[in-house]
Amino acid sequence: MLSAARGEFPPADGAFQVLPALGHSLECSVAFTGHAVIATDAPAASVAAHQPDGFGRSLAPDFLRWLAGTQGEIGTIDATLVADGRGGVPLPERPDMTAHPRVRHAARLRHDVRVYGDERGLVTLASGLAGRRELSIETEPEGRGQGWGRSLLNDALGLVPPGEPVFAAVSPGNARSLRAFLAVGFRPIGSEVIVRPRR
């Protein structure tokens, strides 16, 4: 992930590689251009027997169902985005917002979740997939279509030291959010799905 954030991508060779699971009972499948990375406790030979590849099959429904097991949870397929921190912009921390649904969702998939925000909405900053720094936002309903999302994202990038990467996982179907992230400088580097297996 960090290499991809620097523009150093794996070869577009159609192959996949298997890495250890993420911890916290989570696994994932990540797709780059022509290459896939699967983090799982399943044996590499078992993964290979289900024929994932770097051209999309690592995110195919049948493969993800096998990876999760019949009783496991499969997350959404998200676009993997990255931007550089900017530093220097204060955004107040909001420990009073830990019960918010967005924060509870973040805590299920990430650790060391911290919450920031103001009247525009809230920001979560956490340690996510493979230990990366990960950001998400939720704007107040009255600010939608008013530029609050982009404004809040710009300030959220100030929570990250200048030049350090920060990631976001955004559903492509959430077009409003995706447009906001791209508008403030986030770059797409791949796609991902997180799995909570029960095999």
Image (cartoon, helix red, strand yellow):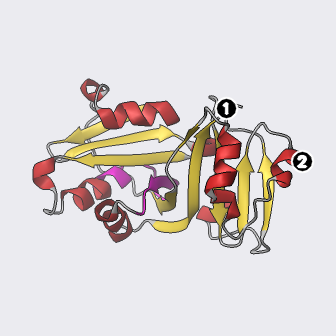
Vertical side of 123 occupied by 94: above or below: above
The amino acid type of the residue labelled 1 equals Gly
Q: Mark 1 Cα within 10 Å, few/some/many (few <14, many 20+)?
A: few
Q: Hey, what amino acid is under mark 2? A: Ala
User: Residue 185, located in which quarter of the rendered image?
Assistant: bottom left
How many C-alpha atoms fall within 10 Å of the one at disc 2: few (<14), some, or many (≥20)?
few
Q: Is residue 32 above or below residue 195?
A: below
Image coordinates of residue 50 in percent, x first then y, are 79, 53
Q: Is residue 103 left or right of residue 117?
A: right
- Outermost residue toward the bottom in this view: 12
Disc marking residue 125: none
Write down the residue under mark 1: 23
What residue lies at 37% left-to-right and 40% top-to-bottom?
Answer: 124
Residue in view at x 62 percent, y 28 percent:
24
Quadrant for the C terminus in the image: top right
In the shown orientation, is residue 126 left or right of residue 89?
A: right
Q: Which residues are magenta?
A: 155-172
Q: Secondary structure at mark 2?
A: helix
- Look at the numbered discs 2 and 1 and tell me whether their residues touch, using CB distance below 8 Å: no
Say left or right for 161 vs 94: right
Quadrant containing the N terminus in the rendered view = bottom right
Tell me where residue 108 appears, x and y as whole percent: 48, 31
The outermost residue toward the right is 45
The x, y position of residue 145, in whole percent, is: 15, 63
Could you tell me if residue 64 is visible in this image?
yes
Q: Which of the two labelled residues, at mark 2 and mark 1, occupies the earlier sequence position?
A: 1
* Label number found at residue 45: 2
Q: In the rendered view, does 176 fall on the left or right side of 73?
A: left
Between the C-alphas of marks 2 and 1, the distance is 21 Å
